[in-house]
Amino acid sequence: MASELEMSVVEHRAEVAGVPVLWREAPWPEPGSAPVLYLHGNPTDGDDFLPFLARTGGIAPDLPGFGRSGKASTFDYSIDGYATWLEAFVDHLELERFSLVVHDWGGVGLALAQRRPPAIERLVLSNCVPLLPGYRWHRWARIWRTRVAGELAMGLTNRFALRRALRGAFVTRGPAVRALADRAWSHFDHGTQRAALRLYRSAPPHVLEAAGRRLGEVTAPALVVWGEHDPYITTDFAHAYAEALGGPTRVEVVDAGHWPWLDRPELVEEIVAFLGEGR
């Protein structure tokens, strides 16, 4: 698989809306078909989706503030800020129609989807931040949302502490978990810490709820894949997303944690098959 990924996925760099951005791109199988846009969460990067890219083609950027993209202090690290930047990004790539796969804070892509519902071919949500009523932040997020305490928590995090914290987000153990933690640590600099703090602080519950008020206008077929042992977001929100979206939606709750496809690698093929149904 490694050689296939190395041959298929190419990294690109450009400046988009004033932000230097890195993204991975693989050719989609059929010319003229809608590509897949993959959006990662905190604290990782677009490498989360390497298992998918060689099979579906598509694009996986490092969002501003994360990975190897720009981390300027002047960027608007909020749901609206990311949605505006994503509009510029898809325009830069001339994507008129695309499928969307979102995980964790990659759920900012749902704000983009609500701005451009006709552009969305198919939609996959996996354990993403609820742009829905009723969500209350988990313990770590509450610390990050608290001034001074959040800065201290971020600043005192070392490789061992990050690996230990992320281990609790999985039901399995093994090299995939360690690799994700080590990759996250390699980019966990001051810029990423600042981006994460600002993003969490920009999103109290009422802002999250307001950000999803137009989800019913997104009518693309959707698949919601949710790890039932996620320590951050309960399965209630998988079903709540299904109720809020305006198109046919299937929910699958699986024996997994926050990154379901790493705990259950067979989910990669299932998600790929769903995305392929639109082609």
Image (cartoon, grey):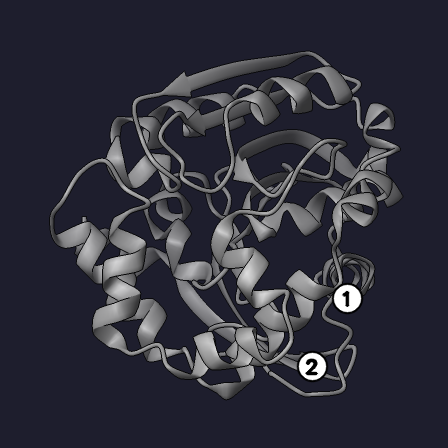
Q: Is residue 278 visible?
A: no
| Amino acid found under the numbered disc labelled 1 | Trp
Question: Residue 131 at what x, y percent from top left?
Answer: 73, 39
Badge 1 density bin: few <14, some 14–19, many ≥20, Cα 10 Å = many
Query: Residue drawn 46% across and 73% down?
Result: 67
Q: Nearer the viewer, residue 243 or 135?
A: 135
- Locate residue 16: give its quadrant: bottom right
Badge 2 density bin: few <14, some 14–19, many ≥20, Cα 10 Å = some
Question: Residue 86 at what x, y percent from top left?
Answer: 74, 60
Q: Is residue 254 visible?
A: yes
Q: Which element is circle 2 on?
A: strand
Q: Which residue is mark 1?
A: 85
Q: Is residue 115 left or right of residue 23?
A: right
Query: Residue drawn 42% across and 29% down?
Result: 272
Q: Nearer the viewer, residue 185 or 100?
A: 185
Q: CA distance from mark 2 to mark 1?
A: 9 Å
Q: Tag 1 or tag 2, which sits nearer the N-term? A: 2
Q: Is residue 272 left or right of residue 129?
A: left
Question: Residue 33 at what x, y percent from top left?
Answer: 63, 36
Q: Is residue 275 left or right of residue 92?
A: left
Q: Residue furthest left?
A: 174
Marking on residue 19: 2
Query: Residue drawn 69% across and 81% down?
Result: 19
User: If the image is split into quadrants, where does the C terminus sit?
Assistant: top right
Q: Are marks 2 and 1 in contact (CB under 8 Å)?
A: yes
| Amino acid found under the numbered disc labelled 2 | Val
Question: Residue 213 at what x, y percent from top left?
Answer: 87, 33
Please tell me whether residue 55 is drawn above or below residue 225 in the rendered image.
Answer: below
